[in-house]
């Protein structure tokens, strides 16, 4: 174990509440898994990148808790977050005669977490599952809140369930092997929580961005903890996404347009969100909702986080069209998550002309 | 409208409570659908047998409530309760740009109801759905209780969700077109509720079995109402099937062995349950749990209902093996639902030798 003290965030609702454990050395520690259902069977679901790094260690520690610990390694990548790959999880469970007490462990990033969670929600109408997120994005965002899903050829995350894990285990050491670009993408989601909910946290991120990029365990522990706290709080007030939860999509409307417009995978989701936050802050400022100073602040912070801050050049019509099909758009009106005074977010529409100006002001190449 | 007065059973839990409407002439009456979400889009999911009979009428009445009412007709039969066919529901929804407010209407028997309910549970992580059961089995059993599922090549109902409908509309007139054999199969599930929960209801069924087979609307109304009340009560006390709910499987352990042993589809599920109840009653009596008189009583009632009462001839070992893989069997022990005094059910195991005697006593050909 290293110096990072264990942190615990309790989340969820009523009888479906659960703990998020955050710390160093968690994976191999027996105590991490104490209190989880100790059924006969367990299935670790991971992917071809993460399984070779960590599956054996997880298997070893779980062997003390389950009679049989199976591992399934899925193909890596968003392109494999499909019904066909989901079926492989069911096939494995049924081939091995796993019953409805079997515990599923999602060992990977958001793709593995979303698929495993959905499989757990549906296998025999629901088996327990544990999130072991291995990307920063998964630790601060996707593993918290109970959303699970797979993609459909016609849209991302179209088929899924709200289903809570038994526990989320964020071992910060696992982030050591994460590619630089993925770490930066995760930082975008960390940064997001500042403007929408906590100006003090935004200050802290600015002061610690170098330590975070250096994967300092204490810095990561605080970033993951505070992010999970904020997300839990927002989700707790709005589990089924009737409204408030949408503020977590700060930067995401512009971001989705970038991702979709460039072709998914060209920009990482977090990269698009980073740039999207700059645009959303600019729009907030131009609507008089927040101080203009937030814009250069976010530009500097995103740059320091290793994130792109200039949007790709696309015709305005294309931007608007892509944002209109974003799922938050109802009846053709684009609803942006905007900053209404630092630390507070609101949903608002805006005139197309103003949106176009905002985009122009931040599109590559940078204005000299 | 005919003479059958509208009956209403309120079921579900807390904020997820909903009404089961039971009566004649419900399909075409605007009032039947009052209070349901009146979203822009609706999708009627039915099958190639039921859609030609009733989909247009449902479409017509729903057209007053939704801007667009789509209909999807699935292939008919248990063999099509698969992931591939489920995908067709999602495809249709997404092709037509249906959003998360879209209401799904399941117009059909248990197969259509289970698949549509599961699709509703997962489409965009949950859209509202309404059950319009068109078989007796679906009206008295599958549409109530919130279980939804599809089959997997390795097992029935292996993938699914607990998901409650907004309303269940049991129009008894729709049962007019139901094949005789399907009606009898549904009666098996009606009969089931008597021994496990309500001796008075058992008396009533005996007195009205002819009227039920003649599809008398008043008789059907009472049978459906009382069945739904009993099922709701049991399910309400045990929504996620931790124990009590299992009593609804009276006759089903023997029944599953018959279905699986003969090849699915040779015996209808309800037929196997009818015969299974006779065996389970015999076992209850031989264990001293209930009076021996229950056995001939059930034999007579099942015969009057048009159900087979002699089990197919299979080697005892095959029976035991098939019952051991039944999902209620944990660690190889077969748990039977037995009658512990008329109107009360218990879960018990029994010596293999006794089970063998019971089977022998009721296997075809009938002892002279
Ligand atoms: N459920 C939610 O609420 C929610 C929220 C946000 C995002 N998501 C989903 O999350 C997904 C994105 O998650 P992600 O960014 O973690 O992507 P990801 O799961 O694809 O992981 C990114 C890459 O990093 C690799 N990787 C993961 N952990 C590693 C490690 N420790 N060392 C080395 N490599 C590692 C993965 O194999 C992958 O190649 C998307 O599908 C998105 O829809 C869900
Ligand atoms: N969810 C639950 O709690 C639950 C409980 C019991 C059974 N089930 C499921 O229900 C299914 C069996 O349901 P079922 O017995 O209704 O079978 P079914 O849905 O296959 O219907 C039986 C046949 O009758 C036809 N049919 C339906 N309505 C008709 C009508 N009004 N007129 C003429 N023909 C009609 C159907 O097209 C089909 O050919 C199984 O898949 C079983 O697993 C679910
Ligand atoms: Zn995001
Ligand atoms: Zn049944």
Image: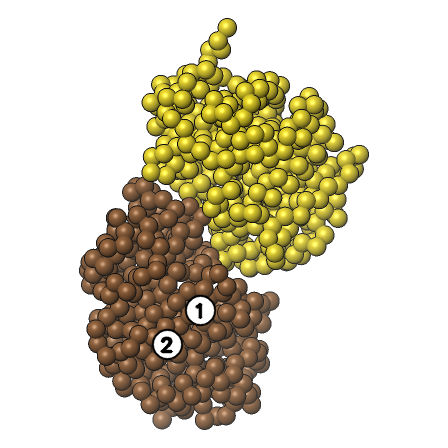
Chain colours: A brown, B yellow
Quadrant of residue A296 in the image?
A: bottom left
Query: In the image, what residue occupies the spot 36% across and 65% down?
Result: A168
Q: Is mark 1 within 8 Å of ligand 1?
A: no
Which residue is painted at 45% across and 58% down in the image? A163
Q: Secondary structure at mark 1?
A: strand
Q: Chain of mark 1?
A: A
Q: Residue A181, position in %: x, y?
A: 28, 75
Secondary structure of the residue carrying tag 2 is: helix
Density class for disc 1 (Cα within 10 Å; few <14, some 14-19, many ≥20) is many
Residue in front for this viewpoint, B235 or B118: B235
Judge left or right: residue A252 versus residue B166. left
| Image coords of residue B270 (percent x, y) | 53, 28
Marks 1/2 same chain: yes
Horizontally, residue B275 falls left or right of residue A208, namely right
Residue A104 location (% of width, % of height): 34, 54
Q: Which residue is mark 1?
A: A11
In front: B48, or A46?
A46
Q: How many marks?
A: 2
Compared to residue B197, the image places residue B99 above or below, namely: below
Distance (Cα) linking label 1 and label 2: 12 Å
Residue drawn 46% across the image and 15% down it: B361
Quadrant into which the N terminus of chain B falls: top right
* Label 2 environment density (alpha carbons within 10 Å; few <14, some 14–19, many ≥20): many
Q: Is residue A321 above or below residue B330?
A: below
Q: Which residue is mark 2?
A: A225
Residue drawn at x 63%, y 48% is B11
* Residue A180 seen in this snapshot: yes
Residue B46 visible (yes or no): no
* Residue B31 in the image: above or below residue A58: above
Say left or right for B11 vs B250.
right
Name the residue nearer the viewer: B360 or B227: B360
- Which mark is first along the chain, 2 or 1? 1
């Amino acid at each position: 174990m290293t110096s990072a003290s264990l942190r615990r965030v309790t989340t969820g609702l009523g009888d479906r509440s659960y703990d998020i454990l955050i710390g160093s050395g968690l994976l191999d520690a027996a105590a991490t898994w104490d209190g989880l259902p100790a059924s006969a069977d367990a299935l670790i679901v991971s992917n071809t990148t993460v399984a070779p790094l960590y599956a054996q260690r997880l298997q070893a520690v779980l062997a003390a808790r389950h009679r049989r610990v199976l591992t399934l390694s899925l193909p890596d990548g968003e392109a494999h977050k499909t019904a066909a790959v989901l079926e492989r999880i069911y096939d494995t469970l049924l081939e091995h005669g796993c019953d409805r007490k079997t515990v599923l462990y999602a060992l990977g990033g958001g793709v593995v977490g979303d698929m495993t969670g959905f499989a757990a929600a549906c296998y025999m109408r629901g088996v327990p599952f544990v999130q072991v997120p291995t990307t920063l994005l998964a630790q601060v965002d996707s593993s918290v809140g109970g959303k699970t899903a797979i993609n459909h050829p016609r849209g991302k995350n179209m088929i899924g369930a709200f289903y809570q894990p038994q526990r989320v285990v964020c071992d910060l050491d696992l982030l050591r092997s994460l590619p630089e670009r993925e770490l930066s993408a995760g930082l975008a989601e960390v940064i997001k929580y500042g403007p929408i909910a906590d100006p003090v946290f935004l200050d802290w991120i600015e002061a610690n961005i170098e330590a975070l990029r250096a994967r300092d365990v204490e810095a990561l522990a605080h970033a993951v903890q505070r992010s999970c706290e904020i997300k839990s709080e927002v989700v707790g007030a709005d589990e089924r996404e009737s409204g408030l939860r949408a503020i977590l999509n700060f930067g995401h409307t512009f971001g989705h347009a970038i991702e979709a417009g460039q072709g998914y995978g060209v920009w990482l989701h977090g990269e698009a969100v980073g740039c999207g936050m700059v645009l959303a802050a600019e729009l907030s400022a131009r609507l008089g909702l927040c101080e203009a100073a937030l814009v250069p602040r976010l530009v500097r912070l995103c740059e320091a986080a290793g994130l792109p801050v200039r949007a790709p050049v696309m015709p305005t019509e294309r931007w608007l069209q892509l944002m209109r099909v974003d799922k938050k758009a109802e009846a053709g009106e684009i609803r942006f998550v905007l900053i209404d005074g630092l630390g507070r977010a609101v949903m608002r529409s805006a005139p197309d002309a103003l949106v176009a100006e905002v985009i122009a002001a931040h599109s590559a190449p940078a204005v000299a």
